[in-house]
Amino acid sequence: MDEHAKRTYEAIADQCTGCGICAEGCEHLQNCGDDMPGEIAKILSAGDPDETVVDFIQKCSLCGMCCEQCPEDLDIAGMVQTARTEFVESGIVDPEQYHFLWVDHDWNAFSLYRKTYNMDALYADLTQNRCNVLFFPGCMLTNEGPHLVQTAAQWLGQGGQAVGASLQCCGAPLYQMGLAARAKDYSERLWRSIEARGVRRVVTACPTCHQRLVETNNSDLEVISIFELMAEAGLGVSDTGFKTVTVHDSCTDRNGAIGKCVRKLLTGLNVKEMAHSGTDTICCGSGGIVSAVDPEICEARAVARMSEVGETGADVCVTYCMACAHRLNAQSEGNAVRHILELVFNEPVDHDAFNEKSYNMWADETGEENSDLLMQSRVLDLQPSN
């Protein structure tokens, strides 16, 4: 156990009062019985976690609700993240189970999807040029809403700026699965490739990408959300056909900075807030890459969130993360969840069709070919043009 992990565990073990307030907003902690974060930290500090503790760590959504609720301001999610790294390094967890999400390799679930449906050709003009403004849409928006990415890039270029795009992942999955060293190396190489294109401003469209890029940015480049730019420009949503909407806030935007901009874009509509929103938002089910550990828990968390959507009586749930839209739509009917860019640009995404294509890419001969490529994947060579 390294010194960082030891200090992390000991701090929470010493300072946690066992008040249980963190568990009030977290069903996952509630299922731990009397084992509050302080007790879990003591077990982790001892270096021999039992199956219950390993299960808790691996199935945490890393949503940060516990940190928000804790009266002692303890970084419980940080403890979980540290434990995941320790589990991988000690052999308790085999990172091979996450192979399809090794985004620092040339073939992963996201790049194989683009290959299967010949999508990289759609982005050729945006990914091969030097640019002042780099649009960083994130993996799910790139694959599930390519027309939204293209329209957004065009909007960004209206002022005469040279706009390009990156199809790369921000690296968050590597970090979340416990591959801390690989995540750090990938982020450093990603930023070098961005700087090599002459970029001065990186524009994000995914709250998780935004958080990760801000955290890993060691340059003087600006990182800003496209939703902030749109709100500043006075864009809005008008004729949607929906009488009322509700907004699902992403866990990585728990401070509400991006969510406020999204609500400004929805000013002309009747917005009904869910029981949990803003700083109290709950996970859509995708958080913490738990789907690779226990898909049923992911589904249950999405069902719980969609239940809150239903309680508002809203016609549609609006997200500003395509991963959230994907997960929640999978537990609803009729594309009941929409990404904000679908409404701003009035360009719907057929989320059900995307789910079917995601399934088909692993079926029959195509699936065999993709599986072979996945197993043969190599560390990604991040050239400046990517």
Image: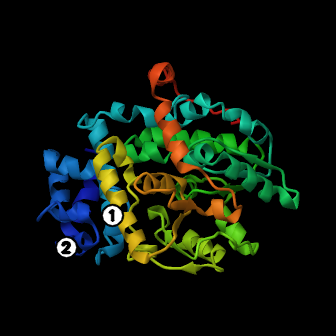
> At 51% from the left edge and 24% from the top edge, which residue is drawn?
378
Q: Amino acid at mark 1?
A: Ala
Describe residue 178's horizontal placement relative to residue 162 as left or right.
left
- Quadrant position of residue 306: bottom left
In which quadrant will I find the C terminus? top right
Q: Quick one: label 1, few (<14), some, or many (20+) residues within 10 Å? A: some
| Horizontal and vertical percent position of residue 236 | 70, 73
Q: Which residue is mark 2?
A: 20
Badge 1 or badge 2: first in the primary sequence: 2
> Going 31% across and 68% down the picture, which residue do you hit?
66
| Image spot of residue 49 (x, y percent) | 16, 47
- Give the position of the N terminus as an image quadrant: top left
Label 2 amino acid? Answer: Gly
Q: Residue at x 49, y 72 (%)?
A: 255
Query: Element at badge 2?
Result: loop
Q: Is residue 100 visible?
A: yes
Mark 1 to mark 2 CA distance (whole Å) = 21 Å
Q: Residues within 10 Å of mark 2 (few under 14, many from 20)?
A: some
- How many marks overall? 2
Considering depth in this image, is 53 or 29 the residue closer to the camera?
29
Q: Quadrant of residue 120?
A: top right
Q: Which residue is mark 1?
A: 304
- Residue 235 lies, in percent from the top left, at 73, 72
Q: Is residue 1 left or right of residue 143?
A: left
